[in-house]
Amino acid sequence: MRPGIWVEIENTLTGANIADNLLALFRPVDLFRKVALDVAAHLVYEYLHDLDRRTGKYLHSIEHLDRQAAVFPEIFNQRSSNE
């Protein structure tokens, strides 16, 4: 395990407020990316950077949702064509 990874794992734990919960969502994703890049390089696998970028964009869109909304925007109700 790379130095600092364990501290990052510990930092994925959350508090009670929205900002802490958003960090708790994004930190493991960032950590997964770091580890996945190392594993992909070690195993000579292609890392799917575009999928990672699109997933990150989707997750970060959660930050901007109306917290008082009764329903989610349509983008959150769409299914992937791969499903």
Image (cartoon, grey):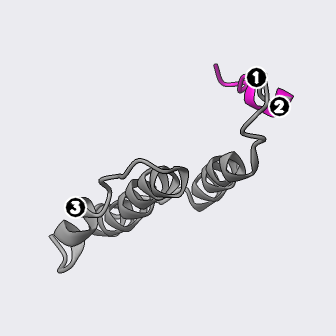
Residue furthest out toward the top: 83
Relative image position of residue 3 (x, y in whole percent): 17, 80
> In terms of sequence position, does the residue under pointer 1 or pointer 3 come before the other?
3
Going by the image, does 54 lie left or right of 22? right
Amino acid tagged 1:
Asn
Range covered by the magenta-colored residues: 74-83
Neighbour tally class for label 2: few under 14, some 14-19, many 20 plus, Cα within 10 Å: few
Q: Secondary structure at mark 3?
A: helix
Relative image position of residue 52 (x, y in whole percent): 57, 55
Q: CA distance from mark 1 to mark 2?
A: 7 Å
> In terms of sequence position, does the residue under pointer 2 or pointer 3 come before the other?
3
Instruction: Tell me if label 2 and label 3 are in contact, CB under 8 Å.
Output: no
Quarter occupied by the C terminus? top right
Going by the image, does 42 lie left or right of 80? left
The residue indicated by pointer 1 is: 77
The residue indicated by pointer 3 is: 10
